[in-house]
Amino acid sequence: DADVTQTPRNRITKTGKRIMLECSQTKGHDRMYWYRQDPGLGLRLIYYSFDVKDINKGEISDGYSVSRQAQAKFSLSLESAIPNQTALYFCATSVGLAGGPVGTQYFGPGTRLLVL
Amino acid sequence: KNQVEQSPQSLIILEGKNCTLQCNYTVSPFSNLRWYKQDTGRGPVSLTIMTFSENTKSNGRYTATLDADTKQSSLHITASQLSDSASYICVVSAYGYNNDMRFGAGTRLTVKP
């Protein structure tokens, strides 16, 4: 079984709709992240969470919100989807600085979102 | 402006040949630099991670180098295989508590038989 899973893998929605992307991990990591990837651009950080009670905005958080329901679950919501949110979305996890290779992230398989 | 620039954008080589991918960065203060491999339709997978004091790190046929003075890194792939066809992403982290990482746009490598 995959260590980091994302659902759904593909989603088509219409402008103005609210959608949620979900991420679950079995690695026991305390840190979780949401990124989006657009063609020709690097991954950009949307939100990150260092533990259940810690949520932080990333580089491009406008139009998105997140929820850390448990250590293993981190959800990304688009409250009112717009076409320029069409992208590939990745969830990632990592250990904290206290243990393991510093900063290594483990990515999920991605969710391909199309907003019409 | 992206603080991590990778070159070339794309590269085609024949199976068995070597190649070198470049990464230049302006992220400061520097904490660490990572190279990831991303197969089409999959999430990135870590290849190497280097901190300020390391200038070479190998992972099988992949060897990464770091020159912190010139703020340059390279990823050398030896004896390429068809399975090396992927995007290779350079990620540079700034030192500090916040997760300030910058991703390069990647180099798309195609290995042909």
Image: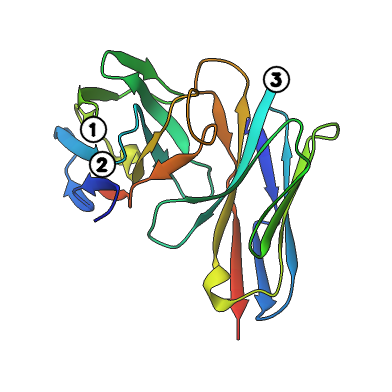
Q: Mark 2 and mark 3, same subunit?
A: no
* Cβ atoms under marks 1 and 3 closer than 8 Å: no
Report the quarter where the N terminus of chain A lies: bottom left
Q: Determine the CA span between mark 1 and mark 3.
A: 31 Å
The image position of residue A109, as x and y in percent, is 33, 52
> What residue is shown with label 1?
A72
How many labels were placed on the picture? 3
**Nearest-to-viewer mark from 2 and 3:** 2
CA separation, marks 2 and 3? 33 Å
> Dot 2: few (<14), some (14–19), or many (≥20) neighbours within 10 Å?
some
- Residue A17 in picture, x, y percent from top left: 14, 35
Q: Specify the amino acid type for callout 2.
A: Thr
Q: Residue furthest front?
A: A99
Name the amino acid, label 1: Ala
**First in residue order: circle 2 vs circle 1:** 2
Badge 2 vs badge 1, beta-carbon distance below 8 Å: yes
Which residue was labeled with disc 2? A26
Taking A105 as reference, is A53 left or right? left
Sort mark 1 into few (<14), some (14-19) or many (20+) by Cα contacts within 10 Å. many
Q: Position of residue A78 (x, y in %)?
A: 23, 30
Depicted B67 relative to depicted B58: above or below: above
Task: Choose between B32 and A57: the one closer to the eye.
Answer: B32
| Residue placed under numbered mark 3 in the picture | B29
Determine the image quadrant of residue A55.
top left
Query: What's the residue at 68%, 42% (across, down)?
Result: B5
The type of residue carrying mark 3 is Pro
SS of the residue under disc 1: loop
As drawn, the label of residue B41 is none
